[in-house]
Image (tube, grey):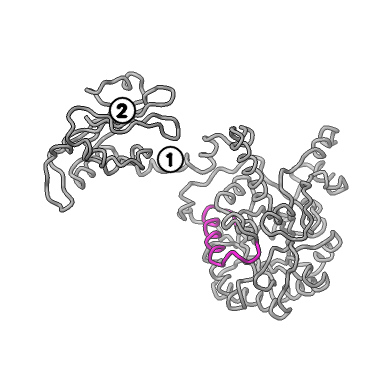
Amino acid sequence: MMNNASLALIKDCKLNLPTFSSFHHRTHPSPLSSSSSSLIISNFKLGSPLQRLLLQPKNSISFHVSAKPRPIPPLSASYGDKAPRAESPAKALRRILDSPGVHQGPACFDALSAKLVERAGFEYCFTSGFSISAARLGLPDVGLISYGEMLDQGRQITQAVSIPVIGDGDNGYGNAMNVKRTVRDFIRAGFAGIILEDQVSPKACGHTHDRKVVSREEAVMRIKAAIDAREESGSDIVIIARTDSRQAVSFDESLWRSRAFADAGADVLFIDALASREEMKAFCEIAPFVPKMANMLEGGGKTPILNPIELEDVGYKIVAYPLSLIGVSIRAMQDALIAIKGGRIPSPRSLPSFEEIKETLGFNSYYEEEKRYATSISQVSSQKASSNSYGTQQRAQDDAQQRGQNSQNPASEVVIPDMYYGPDGSERSFSGIWSRTLRIKITGRDGIEKLDFRIPAGFLEGITNIVPALGGVNIKQLLDDAAEELGGKLLVDFNDSMGDRIQVFLE
């Protein structure tokens, strides 16, 4: 039995997400309402569906998201070196469509957000043209982002994850022939499904004003062209047919087009911006054997927000959440910038630790995989010596005793050859300024010595690989200026962005 504490928790829980109106006014001012009320979970009515959601045992609930994050796939997956799949992305998506219950799919906008969706335990995800336009261009979703930009962003997303990804194909970027090209390239990019709509060009976000759709005949022909492209490619990509005619024409028109799309062979039907639960129910009753898609536009769209149990009762199979990730990202960045401007940093509650960030991005997986290809230092040194006629070996000493070594016993062994090759390939001797030594010393802001090593003064190439902070320093000019001076000279002395003191001496 649900206790009072559980009810209070549900009623008080709020999703920190900008309203859809606030999104729209930031990027595309219009007469839409500027209401700033957040989406409140207590808006879900405590009727029978929600009671079932809260009271049923876990194993009897149709939708499920693992509470424990999935292990991050090896970083090599980001490079496209994934292990062979047991099934294609499209086949995996079709398996989800054939399984019981309603299935939630958050909308991502880049590789990182897609990785987070997978890590959270979702079975699949969508790409959002609205969010990609915002994240990639900083522009509203009014047809400004190009086909090539959407395809490139989608390819990065599909290569970053192993779950199926449904791509936003907009209106196919032209006529039926353009639709065929779009479908073929989405297949090559690794998408499991593609959403194609019947808007004119330039298209617009489905919940904004002044949308227009093509004729019935052209709309149906786009879906037929998409199916032909799939068959010609030997693929089983899922074709999701979307109509925007509910707001552009009428509800009856949107039902007619949906039936026609089903007759043409669409795998999933989607009417955007339905205005009531009754309309949603009527839509799900047409073409009963074709799965239906819902779009829960967070923060103030035209469609009522229903929880997954309610959506399943209405008759939906898959549901998209298009703005959650981009919305909370915008709010989090705004809060962080306010904190920084006020002389603070974001609170630990809102900012993951550096270790958590590295784990999320796959640093640890990378390091483990890197060990498989490690070579000994001696091998590396010999290879460098043979190719450059000189080699260096450097190792930072963390041990306090070794940090205290004096200049006669440096922390790094340096091999200085007698000869080096000039720009013209001729052998030259190390003489004058080139026979002298550079000492590079780094002291932490806590006063503890971090690094102290020596290299030949002629070994300028590669210094920034050892100490990146020296990238903007013209050491060669400093050496030329000091060429006639005898004895030691301090060439560089500054604090880097981390507060460490970096000194370079000519000895």
Label 2: which residue? 452
Going by the numbered disc 2, the residue's amino acid type is Asp
Vertical comparison of 411 with 224: above or below = above
Residue located at (17% from left, 44% from top): 389
- In the rendered structure, the answer to whether residue 141 lies left or right of residue 312 reads left
Q: Position of residue 51 (x, y in %)?
A: 85, 44
Q: Position of residue 439 (x, y in %)?
A: 26, 30
- 49 or 98, nearer to the observer: 49
- In the rendered structure, the answer to whether residue 472 lies left or right of residue 350 reads left
* Picture quadrant of residue 418: top left
Vertical comparison of 390 with 285: above or below = above
Label 1: which residue? 367
Q: Secondary structure at mark 2?
A: strand
- 349 or 463, nearer to the observer: 463
* Picture quadrant of residue 351: top right
Q: Position of residue 297 (x, y in %)?
A: 73, 55
Q: Is residue 158 magenta?
A: yes
Residue bounds of the magenta highlight: 141-164
Earlier-in-chain disc, 1 versus 2 = 1
